Image (spheres, rainbow, N blue to C red):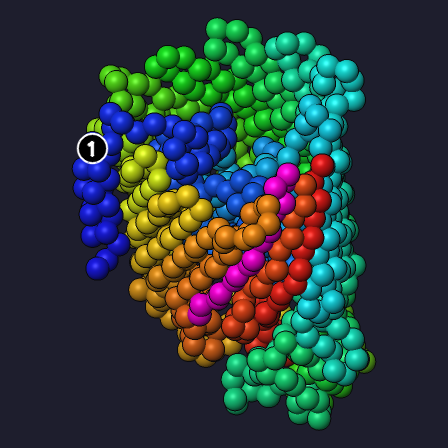
Amino acid sequence: MRLYHLFAAAAVAAIATGSAQAQTAPAAADNGGLEEIVVTAQKRSEKLQDIPVTVTALGAEALERRQVLSVSDLQSIAPGVSVGQHAGYNRLFIRGIGLTSISSGQDPSVSFQVDGVVIGRPSAQLASFFDLERVEVLRGPQGTLYGRNATGGSVNLITRKPTRDLSGYLDLTYGNYDRIQLDGAISGPLDAKGDVRARIAFQKVKHDGYGRNVTLNEDVSDQDSWAVRGILQVDPAANVDITLSADYAREDDHNYPFNGFGPYRSDVPMPGLLLGGTLLPNSRDVTTEVPTRNDRTFWGLSGTIGVDLGGGLRFQLITGYRKSRRANINDPETTSYAVFSPTLTAENARQFSQELQLLYTGDRLNGVAGLFYYDESLRAELDLGFPVIGAALGFPAADYHEDGRIDIKAYAAFTQWTYEVVDHLRLTAGIRYSDEKRRSNGTFTIFSFMPPPNATNVVVPVHVDKSWHALTPKFSIDYKPVENVMLYASATRGFKSGVLLSGNPNPPVNPEYIWSYEAGIKSSFLDNRVQLNAAAFYYDFKDLQVNRIVNVSIVTENAAAARVKGAEVELRARPVEGVTLNADATYLDATFRKYSTKHPARQELGLLDLSGNRLANAPKWSLNAGAEFDLPIGVPGRLSARGDVAWTGKVYFTEFNENLLSQDAVATVDASLQYESEDGHWRASLFGKNLTNRKIVANKFIAAQTTGFALNGGFKPPRTYGLRVGYRL
């Protein structure tokens, strides 16, 4: 049965059951039903089941019990979400829309926010996942309230805030691969009334490599990172609240290697293999003579000022400043013969953002109006060296160097209002105007290692100015036929900024535009012991940004048009005390409607018609299910067992839909056994992730022509398990 049929059946069942329960359903807190989740997805605090937006939200307790420890774990909790990484880039996809590029200067298609401050660089998004109060995953274009670069959706991390009473925790984890993780926080008042409060949280993670560099005898895919965050809250007056935050994160390890999968073409040799080098295809181990290095630092400051003006009005100002630096060294040829000098990719970025909001809350009218400003400077460098030995094999002996700076300025004005026309019937309308300016300055250089007259040094200056603007409206209607059932429909336009690549002569790439049409139902019944939500959606996509490697350069271009059709079903249930169940299913039909391009490794084939091919990272089906049970024990406290299964259909990593560049359908199993003392102070858990030890490819791509079109990529973690012990104040 297709999910469209399930969606219709769910609507009928929910309305029928909701009608029977409407007069008698008490609050969840009174009957042991499901917990009500409050989210800020629409810039104000609202119950999750009351907003006509597809959102998955988990609080701190649920994140811990479901082992959501990093951004990559979002794939197992939110329908339609696919997460991978490339050289430390967060490649996040929602409903088939996400970051396909691996080049500096490209922006994600899913907005990423921490406490309302956007994190612009994909490489900086992996460092904020600790001491969280809540995670919200908004699916579908968010063109009005979130604006630029939110054509796929938005991920919002909300950190834990200072408490008015002394509180804190300390968790110690030990696991296989000699994993040691320490998480902790201390929080409390700094004055007698609690009007000044502070919180300091930290995380330290260190584990051995999931693979080895057998040539250099060192770990790869290890981790050595730490992060700290401090938050200060002040209430200088009864109607004024101020929150100040500072965070710092550091990584220094051999993480994010290029794992080798062999040559793409049997008729094109990889230079290292011709020279007697070795390769371990499809292995977590590598043989390269070039060491893998990951060195990155992130820090930021943010502040939020809120003023209640009376009469339902609230003013809010959110300001953020962030800096990031990363340097990664890899060998794209992946063999044990050092054909290449170490390949360096480096970024240094700083960003400043400010958002002004005026919110109104009334009996029938609610809305927000705001202004947004974003200023980013990105300096990026790519260095790919090919020694003289390559000339004997027919390859150019040269060093390819991209070095440039991109300055980005974005301005926006937005507003969105919801009006209850009659009881239980609401209309929502919003619009955002976005203006984006980009300037690229740099050089693309080829330094020849050959003596005259064969020397062919080439220096191409890159100086481009470009600007774009867009109007992104939203319209929606929602209706509650009975108390616990809401039906809704919406039409939304999304906009992703155009692209200039750093130090790359790639012509400017036009923005992405998307119209999304969605209908859904949110329902709860059986005294809120069951929640059933479903949505069906249709995307009309124009100028989708895709990239490929041609010769030694990354080329980014616009695919003419794409279409995404799909449906989602989410189920949460607490049928009896001590038993919690969850399940979700996603169906995606995400294809190019009109797109012709050349294959990076088969240029002789000319233009290929990719119409009908699936979008990258858009599995046709994905399913998640989990269950948690309280177990009887003879001592005070709570003992519970939990198991989760996540199944993802076949994923193509490029628009060419080739089996060599894909991951077959795969299922993972996670489980845990958790104990909490009766007074709530002590906690302990035994846990395991990917218990069947499936080898799952996170990404694959075809490297430059000079590598012999080597297939590179990376893996998701293998089976991990361990023990966590914690104490709560």
The amino acid on which the numbered mark 1 sits, given as a three-letter code, is Ala
**Per the image, is 118 magenta?**
no
As drawn, 264 above or below 614: below
Locate residue 516, reporting x and y percent.
34, 42
Locate residue 158, reporting x and y percent.
59, 36
Q: Main secondary structure of the magenta part?
A: strand
Dot 1 crowding, Cα within 10 Å, few <14, some 14–19, many 20+: some
Look at 56% across and 47% down and name the residue there: 638
The boundaries of the magenta stretch are 666-680
Which residue is nearer to you in this view: 328 or 189?
A: 189
Q: Is residue 208 visible?
A: yes
As drawn, 21 above or below 88: above
**Per the image, is 676 magenta?**
yes
Residue at label 1?
20
Look at 39% across and 66% down and name the residue there: 649
Quadrant where the C terminus is found in the figure: top right
**Left or right: 550 with respect to 258?**
left
**Left or right: 245 with respect to 507?**
right
Look at 44% across and 33% down and name the residue there: 36
